[in-house]
Image (tube, grey):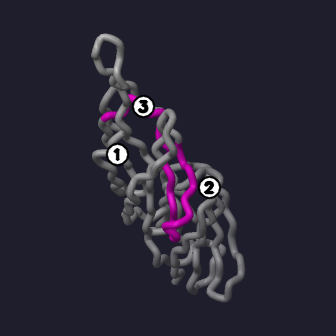
């Protein structure tokens, strides 16, 4: 547009956010997500989305507001990824006056440490075994005979640490110790001699 006096009128515009980096890394039973942005003056925030199994069905797991400024680094730790071995993540980028955009999808293979373990897993009748757990308080532990009968139930009260499982009432044979959590079931074997 021409302005009076022969000058030109130039309308200033804000560039859209530029996502320079987006990574996901497994750290035990957690996933650490990092991303770096540039030109984010117009950014409102990010919705971090996760998909397990089917990389086309995403669920928002966190909303992170944009840090004021032109560039920023962000980190988010997903402390409760699903039980699937491979997790997929993407960012929904929210900006003022712009349609939401999505980042590329990043995948990470979990390097899970076992939720449960029994040591020793071969014992003489009456010898206690130690159940090592790093799972949620209130988890139920069930001991099954090899025929599938429930022979013992325990409610774990510790969120981390060890629980003693008495074997005095178990006859010699093969048993399965099952831990039920909010995410699923894990099973350990125990042999009583």
Give the percent coordinates (x, y) of residue 135. 53, 55
Q: Nearer the viewer, mark 1 or mark 2?
A: 1
**117 or 172, which lies in front?**
117
* Name of the residue lying farthest toward the top: 5
User: Which residue is tagged 3?
Assistant: 42
Task: Name the residue rendered at 39%, 63% in the picture.
Answer: 110
Does dot 2 land on a helix, a strand or a loop? loop
Does dot 1 land on a helix, a strand or a loop? strand
User: Considering only order in the chain, which callout, 3 or 2, is on the residue closer to the N terminus?
Assistant: 3
Mark 3 neighbour class, 10 Å CA radius: few under 14, some 14 to 19, many 20 or more: some
The tag on residue 156 is: 2
**166 or 106, which lies in front?**
106
User: Considering only order in the chain, which callout, 1 or 3, is on the residue closer to the N terminus?
Assistant: 1
* Vertical order, 106 against 39 (above or below): below
Instruction: Find the magenta span and give its range.
Output: 39-62
Task: Name the residue rendered at 55%, 74% in the picture.
Answer: 187
Answer yes or no: do the residues labelled 2 and 3 have beta carbons within 8 Å? no
Q: Is residue 138 left or right of residue 4?
A: right
């Amino acid at each position: 547009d021409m302005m009076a006096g022969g000058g030109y009128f130039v309308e200033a515009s804000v560039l859209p956010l530029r996502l320079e980096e987006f990574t996901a890394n497994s750290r035990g039973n957690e996933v650490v997500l990092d991303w770096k942005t540039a030109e984010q003056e117009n950014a409102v925030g990010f919705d971090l989305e996760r998909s397990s199994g089917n990389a086309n069905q995403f669920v928002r797991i966190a909303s992170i507001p944009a840090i004021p400024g032109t560039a920023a680094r962000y980190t988010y730790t997903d402390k409760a990824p699903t039980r699937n071995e491979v997790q997929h993540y993407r960012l929904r980028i929210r900006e003022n006056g712009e349609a939401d955009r999505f980042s590329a999808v990043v995948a990470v293979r979990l390097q899970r440490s076992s939720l449960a373990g029994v040591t020793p897993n071969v014992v003489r009748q009456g010898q206690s075994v130690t159940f090592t757990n790093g799972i949620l308080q209130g988890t139920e532990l069930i001991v099954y005979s090899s025929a599938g009968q429930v022979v013992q139930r325990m409610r774990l009260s510790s969120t981390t640490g060890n629980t003693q499982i008495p074997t005095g009432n178990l006859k010699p044979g093969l048993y399965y110790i099952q831990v039920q959590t909010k995410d699923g079931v894990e099973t350990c074997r125990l042999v009583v001699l």
